[in-house]
Amino acid sequence: MWPFSWIHAALNWILLWLRLIPHRQVGWKSLNRKTGELEREQQPLLKKLKLILLFNPLTEWLDTTHAMRLYIHEKSIKEGREEGTPQSHNRIKSFIDFYAINMDDFEPSDPEKYPTFEDFFVRKHKPGTRPVAEKDNPKRAVCVADSRVVTYDTVAEGKKLWIKGTDFSITNLVMDVKLGARFTDSAIASFRLSPQDYHRYHSPVSGTVKEFRSLPGDYYQVDPIALRSAVNILTSNARDYVLIESPEFGEVLFCAIGATNVGTVYMHEKFQTPGTKIEKGDELGIFQFGGSSIILAFQKGRVKFDDDLRDCSKHCIQVSVEVGMSLGVATRPSSREQEDETAEKEENGASSYAEVVKEG
């Protein structure tokens, strides 16, 4: 019976492939959070085949010679420059058609108003198209970009199920042993942006900028095929990070990571200065052309990610989200609440340890 079951499985796969290709849905599985439908990411078939070719055990071995790294880096720099030329404007209309981008969400909505493809790539949302979840509730963290996200309660869980690079750790991500130690067993959210996405990124929480750093690096792909290979992508690519001190969440690490064809990872200057106040939903910076990725890290025990995100992530299914959607809630009282509670106890007369034991 086994030959027939194998043939049956192969035919099912071929039919599935033929149905997906016309819609270019050949990318990784994602749950569309708005519609509740399971879908595959739109992606050129040639790009999919390139990813399979580049990220396999043989090519991963080749990477130790730095040949692939050098090739991708130089190609990305070159293509990033080309997207800023007037000639690149001719690509905009075909790009919108290919990915069925709804330009009504953006300002300006007329493609002719963008002088270059680079200008189009960093287009802005129209006011009101991306509302911030519970804007006035500081205990609610929000998604930082239009993207596909996975969330894990610990880095170890994330490495087991999603980020396979042998070198990945928060310490290696920020290149700082002391800062990395403060995020031991941290919860992480990994946001992945594709070329067709809005490429501005926003703060997940309200608080104060505590630290900023920019790290040079390469420009590897951040597609799931690449992330789930042995190549150390997230700790090799160019990246900027900002540390946000939040009364509700403690220290929150926001790391913006470049990828193939990204010309710049740019954090707005005002958020590069320690002491700067930041509100949930504020625009932190931009990525120039290409795919890109963002890693958020919350200190141990400080966040509970939304159940739908956690459940999908455990099955290695991304969730397609929009900036401002709910990400999770703080799981400890804020410093302000603790101060109020202490003041209330002092006012009402707090029980001594001996009284508590006696009452127990």
Image: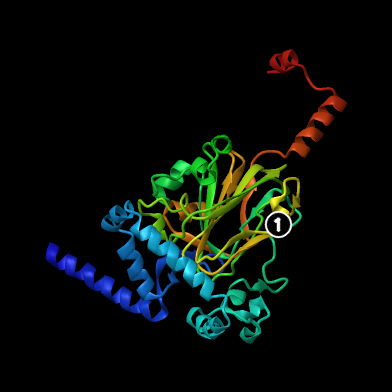
Quadrant for the C terminus in the image: top right
Q: Quadrant of residue 178?
A: top right
Q: Which residue is mark 1?
A: 269
Relative side of 74 to 115, left or right: left
Relative side of 50 to 283, left or right: left
User: What coloring was used for the rendering?
Assistant: rainbow
Q: Is residue 184 visible?
A: yes
Residue lying at 28% horizontally and 53% vertically, measured from the top left: 61
Residue lying at 63% horizontally and 73% vertically, measured from the top left: 123
Q: Position of residue 167 (x, y in %)?
A: 42, 44
Residue lying at 61% horizontally and 80% vertically, measured from the top left: 103
* 284 lies above or below 178: below
Q: Position of residue 30 (x, y in %)?
A: 46, 64
Q: Residues within 10 Å of mark 1 (few under 14, many from 20)?
A: few
Is label 1 in a helix, a strand or a loop? helix
Closer to the camera, 341 or 109?
A: 109
* 24 lies above or below 200: below
Q: Position of residue 189 (x, y in %)?
A: 54, 51
The amino acid type found where label 1 is placed reads Glu
Q: How many numbered marks, from 0 up?
A: 1
